[in-house]
Image: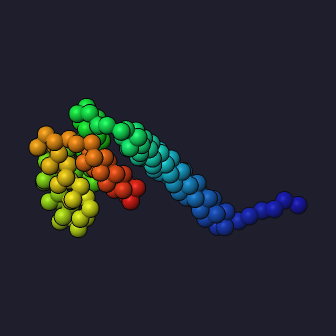
């Protein structure tokens, strides 16, 4: 004896299964897209940490090291805080003050002092690298 299921029951069940398959397909591809972006962000964040580790290990900072550090800082602020790289450090300090992030603001003021006065003493740059490392760690 065959099991005969009436169409009035079979059609809603089939429609529900099709809807579930479509929903699962959409969720799968959204997850795949988000996980790809997340792995990219993790890789970028690891790159910032790698640059910081390298800078923290230096005993002396040349002008070239400071320029590299400057690029890393600006890229970080652009990528993670959506701030244009064209802003000066004083403008960044003002922006962070508005966002109630005093440690970011202080860091930017000190970067401005060293960047625009031409003084790049090793101890000051080392302090800035440590401050930025704390900013990155707390992000």
Residue 102 visible (yes or no): yes
Depth check: give the residue in front, 16 or 128: 128
For image coordinates 29% across by 37% down, the residue present is 61
Query: Can you give x and y, in whole percent of width and height, for residue 60 in the image?
Result: 31, 37
User: Residue 132: x and y, percent?
Assistant: 32, 51
Quadrant hosting residue 100: bottom left
- Determine whether 130 is above or below 116 in the image: below
Query: Which is nearer the eye, 135 or 38?
Result: 135
Residue 135, percent from left and from top: 34, 56
- Residue 86 vs residue 44: left or right? left
The answer to whether residue 48 is above or below residue 91 is: above
Q: Residue visible at 28% across and 47% down?
A: 123
Residue that lies at the very extreme toward the top in this rendered image: 64
Quadrant where the C terminus is found in the figure: bottom left
Considering depth in this image, is 21 or 70 the residue closer to the camera?
Answer: 70
Residue 75 shows up from this direction? no
Q: Residue furthest left?
A: 117
User: Residue at position x 66%, y 67% from top?
Assistant: 9
Number of numbered discs overlaid on the protein picture:
0
């Amino acid at each position: 004896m065959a099991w005969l299921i009436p169409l009035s029951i079979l059609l809603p069940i089939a429609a529900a299964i099709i809807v579930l398959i479509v929903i699962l397909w959409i969720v799968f591809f959204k997850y795949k897209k988000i996980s790809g972006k997340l792995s990219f962000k993790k890789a970028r964040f690891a790159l910032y940490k790698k640059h910081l580790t390298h800078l923290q290990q230096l005993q002396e900072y040349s002008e070239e090291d400071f320029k590299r550090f400057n690029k890393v800082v600006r890229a970080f602020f652009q990528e993670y805080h959506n701030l244009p790289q064209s802003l000066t450090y004083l403008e960044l300090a003002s922006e962070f003050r508005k966002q109630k992030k005093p440690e970011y603001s202080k860091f930017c003021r000190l970067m401005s002092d060293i960047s625009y006065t031409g003084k790049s003493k090793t101890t000051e740059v080392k302090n800035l690298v440590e401050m930025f490392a704390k900013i990155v760690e707390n992000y």
